[in-house]
Image (cartoon, rainbow, N blue to C red):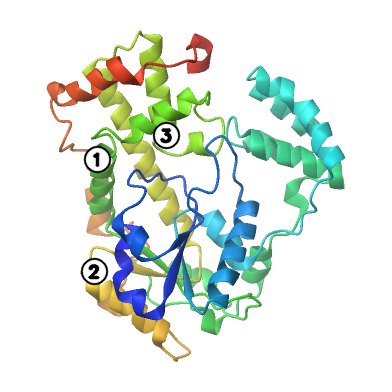
Amino acid sequence: MAKSSVLTPFRCIKVLILDQPSHQIEIERYPSEYLEVPHHLIDILHPSEDYSVGQFFIDGRQATKDILNRGRVPIVTGGTGLYLRWFIYGKPDVPRPSPEVIAEVNDMIVDFQTEYDWDAAVEMVVNAGDPKACSLPRNDWYRLRRSLEILKSTGSPPSSFRIPYDSFRENLNSLDVDDFLEDDCSADISIQNIETDLDYDFLCFFLSSPRVALYRSIDFRCEDMLSGSNGVLSEAKWLLDLGLLPNSNSATRAIGYKQAMEYLLKCRHNGGESSPAEFHGFLNKFQTASRNFAKRQMTWFRGEPMYHWLDASKPLDMILQCIYDAYESESEMLEIPEYLRMRKDIRYTRGASELKLYRSINRHFVRREDCASVLEWIRSEGCKSEFPCEESLLV
């Protein structure tokens, strides 16, 4: 369900949207809803700048204070679980590095990054005292630098600092909270019956659809993002023309951007040429990465006790009324109507059998000739660049 589609009924309680960064990209950057209800933390960085969960905590909490001080209600939207977890429970008390440490770490890392020698840089950080550096996403230079900065500042790796969420889990009243999490939504765990020491009263919902319908919607959405002159390929070209490479920072690791940038680099290496089969291969990678991301989201939020799961395939007005009633309710317990509950576990349902048989079915790019206009754009526009394409960068 589109984030902004849920806004209309909530204008009466003066909401403001605090958009939580996600690895899902949005091509329709300013739909009409953005003009009707103010959004925050949109376009706050240049694509070449990295953005961390710690920085989001600072920016998000500041935006929340500003919204509440104006007598309005912030709604935090997005799908990156770690960002939401830190926003709700707080961030680890890790000291900021001094300018001297930042400069020292930069001197240690810069040559590796310039030479694209990720493996050697990781080995250096592991040897410095952080064995978990080897499990960082490849080319996540920001987090690698951050790990080394923490090591230099404190003598300890990032994993040694306690995360507030861990304390929250330990303080759950229910002795069998894991049974609740695995009990297919037969009971809700709400913030009212959990001992907490949080800064705000949070009301959390996870909206999803039955898996097969969700996957079909994702596949169609990926196709839509490749249609038109301002789609993901156009934005990928812009990033490449800035001198950025896929998987080199936060923006270029985002699903859609990464695959599109890799595809355009290969097209540029081939003199602007691409076959329909190569295009469909790129589309398939894009769709698969997006579906896998949705699967990881569901796995993550299945383990989050504060979220009430709603079936987004149900009529929109029913979902909105449920959320609105929950916000207005003075009851100590929140009960989600059975007809709106989303099943957390589909292992033993009909949906599990259907999921095993799932295959992508395109609606726009079905035949070879359906991508002719995209391939023509790649030849005429997509491969024009001031930056030479080096074969070594395609790996």
Between discs 1 and 3, the one toward the N terminus: 1
Q: For this rendering, which residue is in front, 315 or 350? A: 315
Residue 281: image location, x then y, percent? 29, 24
Q: CA distance from mark 2 to mark 3?
A: 30 Å
Q: Quadrant of the N terminus?
A: bottom left
Horizontal side of 225 relative to 149 (left or right) equals left
Q: Which residue is mark 2?
A: 316
The residue drawn where x is 43% and y is 53% is 297
Residue 157: image location, x then y, percent? 78, 45
Disc 3 on helix, strand or loop?
Answer: helix
Whether residue 342 is visible: no
Residue type, label 1: Asp
The crowd level at tag 2 (other Cα within 10 Å; few <14, some 14-19, many 20+) is some
Q: Which residue is mark 3?
A: 257
Q: Is residue 101 above or below residue 354?
A: above
Residue 206: image location, x then y, percent? 40, 65
Between discs 1 and 2, the one toward the N terminus: 1
Location of residue 358 (image quadrant): top left
Q: Which residue is mark 1?
A: 224
Q: CA distance from mark 1 to mark 2?
A: 22 Å
CB under 8 Å between discs 1 and 2: no
Location of residue 315 (image quadrant): bottom left
The residue drawn where x is 80% and y is 38% is 102
The residue drawn where x is 64% and y is 52% is 55
